[in-house]
Image (spheres, grey):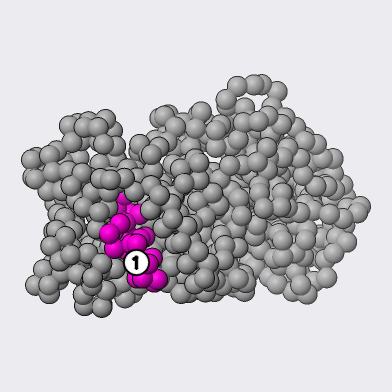
Amino acid sequence: MHLLHQRGPLHQLPGTPQAYDAVLADVVEQALARLTPEGNLEHPDCVDDIGDTSLGITSLLALAWQRGRDPRLPEAVRRSLAFHLRERVYREDNPGYPNLKVRNSGLPYARYTLAAGAHPVGDWPSTVWALLQAVNLLDATDERDGLGGLVEDAQRAELLDVARGYWSWLTEATFFNPQEAGNQAIGCVVGGLMLARRLPDAEAEPVRARAMRLYADEIRAHRVRDRGALLPPEHGGAYDNNYGPISLSFLAQAHRVSGEPVFAEDGDTLARYLDARLTNGGFDTGGPRYSEQHSGFESVLGLRYFGARIGSDLGRYRGDTRWARHACQPDGGVDGHFAWMLVWQIQDRTPWHRTPSPDPARHQLRRGTVSVAFDSRLTPALIEAAGTYYLPAAVRRQHGFGPVTDGFLLCRPMGEVRVRDVRADGLAGKLVTKPVVGRDQVLRHVRSLYVTDGTRLWMTVALEQLDGAPYLLCGLPYAADDGDRVCRVAEGEVVSAGGLRLAHPAASGPDHFDARGELTQEQAAFALAADPRGYGNPDEGWRHLVSSTALEADPAPGAPQGLHVFAVRYGPGGAFAPALEAAGEELTVRTEAFTAVLGPPAGDDRGEPTLTLRR
């Protein structure tokens, strides 16, 4: 079974001017065929996210005219703009809208759905989107840029007045960012910055200054830390794999139009964070809103712009290629929602950076086709090897990779986690030392070594000897690359120096995840979330998981006295029988591909872990 939203890497989409002209040509033909006598360009099946969609198509027609001067377009632009100004600009308060600070302001806004009171909670982002469509259209028709003649002066002046009103409604009549969605909030700031460029100087500076204050006080001041990075919060969480790259695109546009260093700095931070959590194959999962859903073209601008800035191949991100160029309805027909992002994507000429960053990252190990993304506790959050993706497994409501004794998973740190990265002879290694406490309240130091040659991954975990029959929880095989798609799997290519088994939950129900079933991680996570799908936090829901399919490895034979050592290899190869030797507190691990010497658990004279690695 294929996962719906993780398809092809976004950098595979052709980005030449000719390719974009072909995209616009298709939009033009669809729009001209759809244009109603009233000037409506909305898709006939559009119900939600509708308030900005016709204006979005209008802005694309204006861009197409700007690039090709198609004589059919001026009339279509004027008629469709008149429709938006006449039929889609609302000034009476939407019944039931909960976020107003000023009642009966008379300021214009856009509705998420058209029926009064039907679903007013989405009006704030819909108005942000309408503002962005409007400023793009203003840019495409500005006399100062030699682009006059597309619309009449009076019609353009009315659009400018509505755009002013959208900004005022968003920043004065309502609470700012009521959904706690970083992408929406940064989008609003971008709208203000772009609007300011089209206003007289006396009006422009207050708008620009307010946009910058909102970014500093309402977005930047509320950033959330994850994996060592401060990130714009997304629907109550630090990062969402659907909306996070959209925020990155907004930061790119904010920097493009303002030149303010803060947008570049914050975009670089978000880009490096995304680079570290993203597997080599572009797979990602997690977030407080949609868990496994991925944006498509909305991410391209940010991934391309900041991939070039940080020198890494962010375009490997697997997007929903059904939205490869623009928003679509189920029949594939163009939808104007998010049209502003296609405009900016076409205008920006940054090339894709297609090679990985050469710099080691604390929360990532990557070489060739192998990658490990680590969470804030420096426990693997996602492993990729031989085209298979492994999630943290669950045992007794504990999630992660690590030793298990008496049903207790030893992966949560009780003190500082220290990391050492080494690259030698074509190998990349990472040693993580972590103090942990078990049920017996004894403090133990776990040394976890990860080594890859680019095609295989070795994981070796050593700690003081445990009582009973401990085993290593070493992943939930979940998905695999299948050409241009990602499909569900329930097993992977893994061997262990000790016994290895693939265990499945003994119980059934939503809080026991069996990888052999058809349910996806996203669906299971939402089933366990406290709120309805689309509003609940799937990450919180997934944390309620009691047990899952899991690879379990027994201790390796021949471990030095007083130690338990677990050794696992992910990926292809023959027999696996590592040799383990101790000299004092040092541990030497010899495999078919490398020799590694792990220093004492206490580290060097500064407490830092020591590691030597050679073929």
Q: Can see residue 216?
A: no
Q: Amino acid at mark 1?
A: Pro
Q: Residue at x 26, y 77 (%)?
A: 145
* Percent position of residue 287, x then y: 48, 45
- Looking at the figure, which quarter contains the C terminus? bottom right
> Does the magenta segment cover residue 74?
yes
Q: Can see residue 450?
A: yes
Residue highlighted by disc 1: 71
> Residue 49, located in which quarter of the rendered image?
top left
Q: Residue at x 60, y 63 (%)?
A: 12
By secondary structure, the bulk of the magenta-drawn segment is best described as helix
Q: Residue at x 87, y 55 (%)?
A: 573
Q: Residue at x 25, y 41 (%)?
A: 111
> Does the magenta segment cover residue 168?
no
* Percent position of residue 556, x then y: 83, 47
Magenta residue span: 52-76
Q: Is residue 180 above or below residue 348?
A: above
- Looking at the figure, which quarter contains the N terminus? top right
Q: Is residue 148 above or below residue 569?
A: below
